[in-house]
């Protein structure tokens, strides 16, 4: 009966019944990622840090582009207002329509960049 119990413990734990893992099994467990069962990469912290730095730089560049495009939107909106102020109530110039379309495209572009 004791033999049966000890072999049952061995089968469940994958090692001796006393809970200690053999040297080979223990070294395998240390070198594997417990969550995914893959071998750990010793450079992983460095890779993560580099990835975070890259993401920060991408976000910084994106914000610079958004600010630049926002400044351009302001300038275009100001120009559009000037064109509308110059036009009379019966006639709008083609330039007013072009400026409005340009503003619309740029505003859509800024919106998409903000979603990224």
Image (cartoon, grey):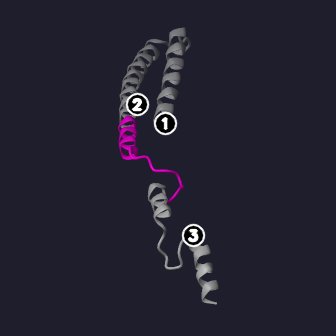
Residue 17 vertical position relative to residue 24 in the rendered view, above or below = below
Q: Could you tell me which residue is drawn at 51 percent across and 32 percent down?
A: 112
- The image shows residue 45 at horizontal and vertical percentages of 37, 46
Circle 1 sits in a helix, a strand or a loop, which is it?
loop
Instruction: Residue under label 3, please give it.
Output: 14
Q: Return the residue nearer the eye: 37 or 9.
A: 9
Q: Quadrant of the N terminus?
A: bottom right
Q: Which residue is mark 1?
A: 116
**x and y percentages locating residue 97 in the rendered image:** 54, 15
What span is in magenta? Answer: 34-55
- Residue found farthest to the bottom: 1
Foreground label between 1 and 3? 3
Q: Is residue 40 magenta?
A: yes
- Kindly identify which residue carries mark 2: 62
- Name the foreground residue: 99 vs 22: 22
Q: Is residue 86 left or right of residue 2?
A: left
- Whether 99 is drawn above or below 44: the answer is above
């Amino acid at each position: 009966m004791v033999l049966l119990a000890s072999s049952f413990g061995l089968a469940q734990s994958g090692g001796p019944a006393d809970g200690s893992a053999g040297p080979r099994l223990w070294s395998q467990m240390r070198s594997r990622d417990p969550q995914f069962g893959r071998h750990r990469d010793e450079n992983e912290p460095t890779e993560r840090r580099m990835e975070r730095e890259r993401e920060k730089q991408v976000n910084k560049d994106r914000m610079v582009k958004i600010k630049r495009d926002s400044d351009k939107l302001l300038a275009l909106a100001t120009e559009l207002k000037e064109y509308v102020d110059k036009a009379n109530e019966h006639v709008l110039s083609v330039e007013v329509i072009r400026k409005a379309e340009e503003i619309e495209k740029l505003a859509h572009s800024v919106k998409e960049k903000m979603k990224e």
